[in-house]
Image (tube, rainbow, N blue to C red):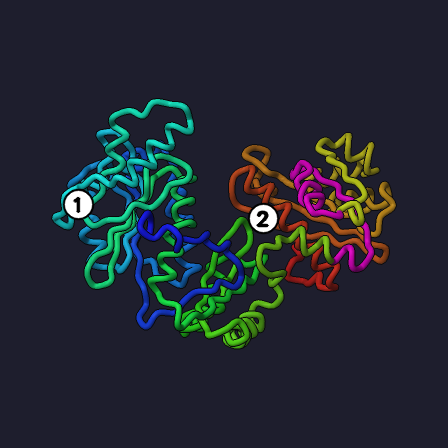
Amino acid sequence: MGYRHEQAIGKGEEAQHRVDVVVPTGEMIAELIIVGTELLLGEVVDTNSAYMAQRLAELGIDLYYVNRVGDNRKRIAQLVQQAHERADLVIISGGLGPTADDLTKEAVADAFGLELVLCQDALADIEEHFRRLNRVMSENNKRQAYLPKGATALPNPKGTAPGVLLELSGGKAVVMLPGVPVELKAIMEDSVIPYIRRKLGEENRATIYYKVLRFYGLGESAIDNIVQDIIAAQTNPTIAPYAGSGEVRLRITAKAANESEALRLIEPVERQLLERLGPYFYGYGDEGLEIVVARLLLAQKKTVAVAESCTGGLISHKLTNVAGSSGYYMQGAVTYSNAAKTAVLGVEPELLTRFGAVSKQVAKAMAEGVRKWAGTDIGLSVTGIAGPGGGSAAKPVGLVYFGVSYPQDTKVFGRQFAGDRLQVKERAALAALDILRRYLLGNLGEELED
């Protein structure tokens, strides 16, 4: 490991839907400690814990606690002791720099009654780093080469502070990593993840496989109410819900001897979820609504044009983010003013005067107008009140109307969204894409109608 086992350290694998891991005889538990007063003051956003939590999950390692602590030697040592009692693997980020407030190694040494000793290999690496940059190494950089006695330095290809591995009795270990994200990730991928894999053992290598199901039209709490008995009964596979902007994802994860066995475990759970949530299911994995809609449009060889008011072009932006969009997206119009709705889309001024721009009648006329203007198979429209002003008792902020026009008919739907201006725009754009998706699937149901 580290300088003593340099040849054994390989590159970490990229996260995939299938992750080869080793299933240990007993579960491995990890705990994270993120060091830095700047984190407690809100000056810096902690991205390291999210990255490490994801990588540990991919390895099948349970993570129960993530702690943040300032640059205080005594408090860091206390947290390390507590984490060591609860977890098999403690990973600390931050506090490995050359300045006086970088105290992680000192605190870890205090926690286990160890002294700090100079690692000549680590010092040589730091000196070489400065030579490559044609810079003179400061004396305080030498502090970074001191490790708790018995610890191993982990090479840092991106900076001066080596990572540190301290193996303890009972098969437990403490890993210390720099707080700079690019350095932390490099050491994690090159050294820590391979170490974890070897620690878990090679003889019972297995697979973690997961599928992500995506739903639109129900909130996280509503989905939880519908499938809470399935989630409560989970063992292997497990189900984890994730709420997004207007959508919910359910991740089903299974541990098994191989991929086919993992899929065998996942399939009945997936089937149960879809039996209850089928009308709201739209896709898998990382594929957003715009990708699903694009695939349907291309498969059916249909074209679309979009007329937008309150979303300001966001729907067109999403549709054209997909490669190959020229095969289905013809043109769009951001008709923000009443005059533009009339001049470009042919919306009758009488409709605007009588019903207002935010109305079923105008949404219908916009959808029909943009389809005629562009000569497409489908016309999609949106008009609403994004806020924060412009609302009334009859038409509150967040009220949005959608129209979808096709050769046989035009349908209009109304929705009420919560949130600030940007949230209303994003949620309205997603709702428009979902209406288009439902039309393409022949599923424009009553539940969407106002």
Q: Is residue 321 left or right of residue 20?
A: right
The front one of 44 and 349 is 44
Asked which quadrant contains residue 344, the reply is top right
The type of residue carrying mark 1 is Ala
Q: Residue at x 58, y 70 (%)?
A: 274
- Point 80% across, 59% down: residue: 300
Earlier along the polypeptide chain: callout 1 or callout 2? 1
Q: Nearer the viewer, mark 1 or mark 2?
A: 1
Left or right, residue 194 beside residue 277: left
Dot 2 alpha-carbon crowd within 10 angstroms: few under 14, some 14 to 19, many 20 or more: some
Left or right: 369 in relation to 9: right
Q: How many marks?
A: 2
Looking at the picture, does residue 207 appear above or below residue 337? below
Question: Residue 387 location in percent, x, y?
Answer: 57, 36
Kindly identify which numbered label has been placed on residue 416: 2
Q: Does the segment drawn in magenta span residue 98?
A: no
Q: Could you say whether the residue bearing mark 1 is in a helix, strand or loop?
A: helix
Q: Which residues are magenta?
A: 296-324
- Is 315 magenta? The answer is yes
Residue assigned mark 1: 109
Q: Is residue 85 visible?
A: yes
